[in-house]
Amino acid sequence: MLAGALVHPDQRCVIPVCPEAIQQQDGNTKNDCEQNAMKRFLLGYREDHPKLKTVLLTDALHATLPCLELLTKLDIDFVLSVKPGSHEKLFSGVDTRETNGTVHHFEEEETIGDKVKKKVTRHYRFTNGIFLNHQSTKHLVNFLEYWETTQWIQKGKVKEERVHFSWVTNYSLYESSCRQIVRAGRTRWKIENETFNTLKNQGYEFEHNFGHGYKNLSSNFAHLMLLAFLIDQLQELRCRVFQAALRSVFDRRSRLWVKIKSAYEFLPIEFDSWHEFLSFFNDPSPWIRPRPEISSA
């Protein structure tokens, strides 16, 4: 299953969109793959949302010329991850430009933390109008590389963490725009964490062995599960009653599902609406009758 979601750097909630199954299509003899599923996914997405301004975030697998051509046709902007191992020509081209002085660098530092002061150093390297590879001269991309080094003192020793990212994008790169592109590119992690990790570990039971089966039964189950996840995300985003119920279990969705299932099974109470049902977890007093006093005589 190839699944996508609408994500934002400052928003914990994600909005899943219609997924695409990775399985052999009717009339095809070759097995399906993730890249073919991505083509169908993008076509279906643009058909469902023909006017929605979109920036596609993906891993390095989809930073290919066929994908760029399709994105151009569908009017979709992109910030795609690239890696030296899978994009050798791109990185060698950047290194060549480095010797010519057409690659730009800048660096900034920041101190964060209250109790433990940490020094964060951010280094940017970028260039515009470079070939993704040498197979075609039609599509130029803009390249951005980013290092972030965090240093702090712990028990008298200097600790250090370093992360490295690199992307190609159709947005022009300047010092002012690089920071925004880095924020956008790093937001792709929300698809892994807030989406897939949530579906696997927060009570939705989405696993890799969710096989398609011969009659598409499990594919239908996966679509229904994502539809339920969409409804939950919309409630978490805009419904104050749902937000309060989620906070009551320390923002653990799996715990909330346990409470909901227990209430369905054991509570001898009829609720008139979903709003009433969720309100019960925040303040059950209107539905709980006081126990009758038992005389000691």
Image (cartoon, rainbow, N blue to C red):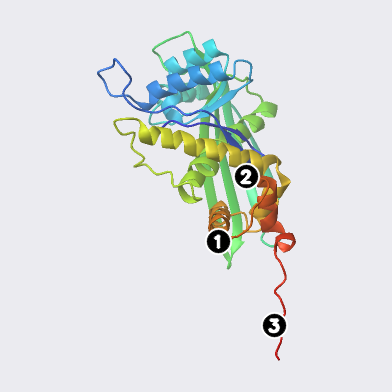
Q: What element carries label 3?
A: loop
| Position of residue 36 measured from the top left corner of the image (x, y, whole percent) | 38, 21
Q: What residue type is labelled 3?
A: Ile
Mark nearest the camera among 3 and 1 is 3
Total labels: the figure holds 3
The residue pinned by badge 2 equals 121
Residue kind at label 2, given as amino acid type: Thr
Q: Which amino acid does label 1 sit on?
A: Phe
Q: Relative to the observer, which residue lies in front, 227 or 158?
A: 227
Q: Do residues under tags 3 and 1 come within 8 Å of each other at their CB atoms?
A: no
- Judged from the image, the secondary structure of the residue bearing numbered disc 1 is helix
In the rendered structure, which disc, 3 or 1, sits on the residue that comes first in sequence? 1
Please indicate whether residue 276 sits to the left or right of residue 93 in the image: right
Name the residue that disc number 1 marks.
266
- Could you tell me residue 246's position as x and y percent? 64, 53
Instruction: Nearest to the eye among marks 1 and 2: give it.
Output: 1
Residue 227: x percent and y percent? Answer: 53, 35
Between marks 3 and 1, how big is the CA–CA gap? Answer: 25 Å
Q: Dot 3 corresponds to which residue?
A: 294
Q: Residues within 10 Å of mark 3 (few under 14, many from 20)?
A: few
How many neighbours does mark 1 have within 10 angstroms: few (below 14), some (14-19), or many (20 or more)? few
Q: Is mark 2 on a helix, strand or loop?
A: strand
Residue 196 visible in image: yes
User: Residue 240 — which label?
Assistant: none
Location of the C terminus (image quadrant):
bottom right
In the rendered structure, the answer to whether residue 191 lies left or right of residue 92 reads right
Most distant residue in the top direction: 138
* In the image, residue 93 above or below residue 222: above
Q: Can residue 102 be seen in this view?
A: no
